[in-house]
Image: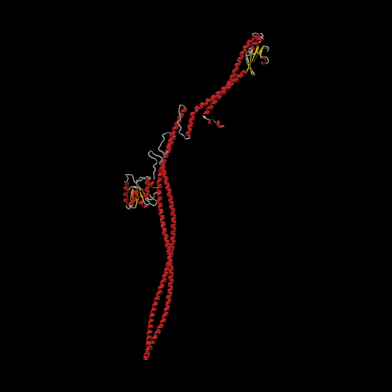
Amino acid sequence: MLLVLNPSHLSLRSKLVGLITLLISGVAIFLILFFPARMDAFSRRWLERRGEGMATVLANASAPGLEFDDSSNVQALLNGLAGNAEIRYATVKRPNGTNLAALHPERAPEGTTAVPTGVVSSYEGDELRVYAPVKPRSGAAGVLTLGFGLDELKREKHAQDIAVGWVSIIVFILGLGTSFIVGTVLVRPVRQMTDVALRIARGDLSQSELHVTSRDEVGRMAEAFNQMLRSLRELAAAAQRIGQGDLTLRLNMEGQLAEAFNGMVESQRSLVGQIGETVIQLGSAAAEIYAAAQQQEGASNQQASGVEEVSRTMQSLLDSASHVANSTKGVLTAAERTKQTTDATSKRVAGLGDHTNRIAEVLEVIRDIADRSDLLALNASLEATRAGEAGRAFALVATEMRRLAERVTASVQDVKTLLADIRAFGASTVMAADEGRKLADGTTESARQITLVTQQQRTATEQVLQSMQQITVILGQTVQSVQQARSAVQMLKTLADQLAELMARFRVDERSGVKPKAA
Amino acid sequence: MSQGRPQKKIVLLDDSELIRELVRETLEERGYQVVDVSTPFGFSNLLRRENPDLALLDVTMPTLRGDKLAEIAIQHGISCPIVLFSDRPAEELAAMAKAVKAAGYIRKTGDMDEVVRAVERFLK
């Protein structure tokens, strides 16, 4: 409710209409209050004057009648008033207070009345009483009383009130209408401007300029408005060109807005220039990193294949070591068996020596027997010779026996030689076997050492292989990382190129835009 | 030596500190201003920033090969002459320089006078 009453929230036209309405209402109220009162006073005065005039005339005319107490004449005079609706009654009283003549005496007030010095009127209730002295040429004066009814007056006043009321209403309505029309006419350009301003406020500059017809304040205001619209349009066009990337323009206008605008364009130009420069730098830096990543990727791949090759070599080395270990195991076994065999041989050869000694002893016995046999044969032969012819055959047998004994002795000698040989062989065999044993011992030791070394080599190779596998894993990760880095940098490079293309849309000097580089 | 005219500026990229020291000292003795760097990253931007008269670029580097780097720099609009600087065979260097549109090559030999002469030739 307060909002409605707050004049600052009302429209200009409402204010105007309200103001004029207030004014007219004042006038109407004045009319209603002031004029009927005045008219009433005026009517009353007019009635009084008329009444007084009539009373004077009637008093003068009644004077002879009073003088001669001629009531019929006076009555006729009063009866003449009967046609007058205003007159309620009329009396002419003798100086003693009795009626000389009367018109509607029943309406007249009772009692006597003092004779006034002149015509006097007074309001009594709803009537006007006019008293006039009736002065005959001789004798005491009587009183003429006229009673005027105020009904007519009231009726007139009422009609007048109604008329004034109607006039007031008409004036009020006319005033309201006029003020409305005047307000509308006055406000229309303002409203138009308001509409335009609202559309401008919403960002719409497409509307046509205001049609300026008058040179008054409103006209000048419209002209100023048009100028503002033109400036805004220029500003909008400039903003559009900036939006299309043209940063070369400069507004040839004065004022803070143009200054701010030019400042903005200037800083944008500088910013775009810097960004362009940065983009170029970014592009080349990204290209460099990209190329480096590519090179690193190649190197990593090469390393990976190198490591793979080393791993393969290590694997074959491991296989060789296994092979060597197996072979060495065989050698060890063989060497141990050789040693055992050689030991057995040595023992056997030693046993053979014993046997040989026994054989030599037996041979000595045989040789002794052969020697004795030979001696016996010789004796027998000698005996045979002595026996002559008879002993001849015996001599032959003895000779043969001697030959046999000699052959046995020779054979024993041969066997002895052989035995010596066997003994010599046995000794050398034992020596050889001993050497063989020592050799086998050496082989065993060597084989053990080889096994140990091979084992160590195997462990070391396995460790190397393990390390190589780890290196392969790490290299794989490295390659992956480098690939990721490369694709990331590739994206960066692509983005830098795209940014450069975008930057090319801006024109920062008259000749060209930010110089982009098509990489 | 070159008080009369402005110093010529040379950028040197080599991963070997020894080579950088040697070449820098040699060229500075001849009155050149030398900016030397060891890493290939940011090389194009360095050239853009320093705007030298000549850039010497080692080829064999662990992170990024010099010829590739030269290619990138030239593709990215570097206009200063880029010269490959390596101990690789001359034919290989010539082919490389041609492939990446470099200005040429200078072989790394023990003879620094020859290097200086080659630099002067490129600066002409």
In percent of width and height, residue A250 lies at: 41, 36
In percent of width and height, residue A164 lies at: 57, 21
In percent of width and height, residue B37 lies at: 38, 49
Name the one closer to the observer, A260 or A315: A315
Q: Is residue A120 above or below residue B108?
A: above
Instruction: Identify the residue at image location x=49%, y=27%.
Output: A186
Name which quarter of the figure residue A404 lies in.
bottom left
The answer to whether residue B25 of the structure is visible from this angle is no
In which quadrant of the rendered image does the N terminus of chain A lie?
Answer: top right
Q: Is residue A78 above or below residue A381?
A: above
Name the one closer to the observer, A175 or A276: A175
In percent of width and height, residue A260 lies at: 44, 36
Q: Is residue A179 above or below residue A63?
A: below
- Visual colour scheme: secondary structure
Please give left or right for residue A328 compared with residue A36 in the image. left
Name the one closer to the observer, A263 or A420: A420
Name which quarter of the figure residue A108 lies in.
top right
The answer to whether residue A19 of the structure is visible from this angle is yes
Please give left or right for residue B25 compared with residue A103 in the image. left
Please give left or right for residue A413 compared with residue A171 in the image. left
Instruction: Identify the residue at image location x=43%, y=52%.
Output: A479
- How many marks the image carries: the answer is 0
Please give left or right for residue A414 compared with residue A47 in the image. left
Name the one closer to the observer, A449 or A497: A497
In which quadrant of the rendered image does the C terminus of chain A lie?
Answer: top left
